[in-house]
Image: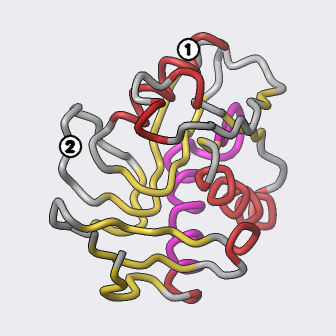
């Protein structure tokens, strides 16, 4: 892959996380019955960053992580030896507003699988979607309520989200295949 450009640097990433965290709480009218669930893998890191901002400004919020690896129907395309990250949702989802968090919204397939997996665990009162980057090209009609940036790409381009805990930095980059 060939690096094309940096979309968000550290400051841009932090600005987007702060804005998204406040939008989520405002949309929910506070943190009551709010649960932030990150989709493994990078969605969990973004969710952790959102929760840190929310808890600093508003107090405790429910949190979890959702591993959709075994729910995918395209598993052979993703990885020959998939890594399981585990699902950890320690609260009853009934009556909650769940915000699913992912790094990049592309075709919508990950969101479809995540919603299926989530509803096998429990049925929230509301389910919303938060993504750091929406790059368009949807094949399934999902729309994120909370978006850090809309970056329209070509079919031969990929957006890489780098997270501090996994990559040593928070930023997003555009690459060409």
- Determine which of the numbered discs, if any, sits on residue 119 in the image: 1
Report, in whole angstroms, how far the alpha carbon at label 2 lies from the one at label 1: 22 Å
User: Height in image: 49 above or below 119?
Assistant: below
Left or right? Give the position of 172 relative to 138.
Answer: right
* Magenta stretch: helix, strand or loop mostly: helix
What residue is disc 2 on?
138
**Residue 100 location, quadrant:** top right
Q: Position of residue 123 (x, y in %)?
A: 58, 12
Nearest the eye: 82 or 40? 82
- Label 1: how many residues lie within 10 Å, few (<14), some (14-19) or many (20+)? few
**Image coloring type:** secondary structure
- Label 2: how many residues lie within 10 Å, few (<14), some (14-19) or many (20+)? some
- Determine which of the numbered discs, if any, sits on residue 4 in the image: none
Where the N terminus falls, by quadrant? bottom left
* Residue 32 falls inside the magenta stretch: yes
Nearest the eye: 20 or 173? 173
The residue range painted magenta reads 13-37
First of labels 2, 1 by sequence position: 1
User: Height in image: 33 above or below 160?
Assistant: above
Residue drawn at (47%, 76%), measured in percent from left and top? 172
Residue drawn at (47%, 41%), measured in percent from left and top? 78
Q: Position of residue 155 (x, y in %)?
A: 17, 59
- How many labels, in total? 2
Q: Position of residue 157 (x, y in %)?
A: 25, 68
């Amino acid at each position: 892959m060939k690096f094309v450009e940096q979309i968000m640097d550290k400051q841009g990433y932090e600005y987007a996380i702060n804005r998204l965290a406040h939008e989520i709480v405002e949309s929910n009218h506070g943190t009551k019955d709010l649960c932030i669930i990150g989709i493994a893998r990078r969605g969990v890191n973004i969710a952790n960053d959102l929760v840190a901002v929310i808890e600093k400004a508003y107090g405790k919020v429910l949190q979890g992580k959702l591993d959709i690896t075994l729910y995918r129907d395209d598993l052979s395309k993703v990885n020959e030896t998939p890594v399981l990250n585990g699902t950890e949702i320690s609260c009853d989802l009934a009556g909650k507003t769940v915000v699913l968090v992912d790094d990049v919204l592309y075709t919508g397939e990950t969101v479809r699988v995540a919603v299926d997996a989530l509803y096998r665990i429990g049925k929230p009162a509301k389910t919303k979607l938060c993504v750091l980057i929406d790059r368009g090209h949807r094949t399934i009609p999902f729309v994120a309520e909370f978006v850090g940036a809309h970056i329209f790409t070509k079919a031969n381009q990929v957006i890489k989200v780098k997270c501090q805990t996994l990559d040593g930095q928070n930023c997003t980059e555009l690459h060409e295949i």
